[in-house]
Image: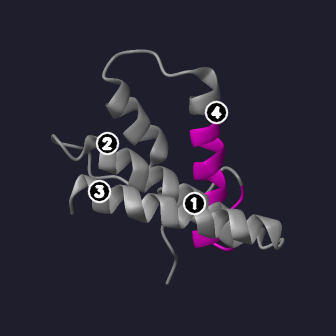
Amino acid sequence: MSYEAWIRKALRFREYAEEDLRSGRYDSAAFFAQQAAEFLLRGVLITGSRPLTHAVTELLAYLALGRSVSEDAARSAEASEAHYIQTRCTDARLSGCRGRRRRR
């Protein structure tokens, strides 16, 4: 995908998140907010190599390349990620389901 395509999708997901937030659909608002952040960061990183991850915190750190990331940006990325995990794993807590395997 081109830079423009990543940014278009990011902006569309942000609109979905804002609409869902206004409508009180907090789970889907969290999901779309995380997707918007992820797609925006991927769009910025598209010019070079990028990590294969959905973690906004990892994408942000990769983008910073050794420079410090603002405390607000880091805190927002962590909060977004935590709430995004809850939309994907219905029984997850804020500590999440990372690395957790489903028992059969």
83 relative position to 70: left or right: right
Residue at disc 1, secondary structure: helix
Kindly identify which residue carries mark 2: 44
Q: Nearer the viewer, mark 2 or mark 3?
A: 3
Distance between the alpha carbons at the discs numbered 4 and 2:
20 Å
Q: Is residue 85 visible?
A: no
Q: Is residue 11 visible?
A: yes
Q: Residue at x 81, y 66 (%)?
A: 22
Mark 1 nearby-residue class (10 Å; few <14, some 14–19, many ≥20): many
Image location (x, y in percent) of residue 18: 69, 62
| Residue type of the residue flagged with mark 4 | Arg
**Mark identifier at residue 14:** 1
Quarter of the picture containing the N terminus is bottom left
Q: Residue at x 52, y 77 (%)?
A: 103
| Residue type of the residue flagged with mark 2 | Val
Q: What are the residue bounds of the magenta stretch?
A: 75-93
Circles 4 and 2, Cβ within 8 Å, touching? The answer is: no
Image location (x, y in percent) of residue 39: 40, 55
103 relative position to 51: left or right: right
Q: In the image, is residue 38 above or below residue 69?
A: below
Kindly identify which residue carries mark 3: 4
Who comes first in sequence, dot 4 or dot 2? 2
| Residue type of the residue flagged with mark 1 | Arg
Residue at disc 3, secondary structure: helix
Distance between the alpha carbons at the discs numbered 2 and 1:
16 Å
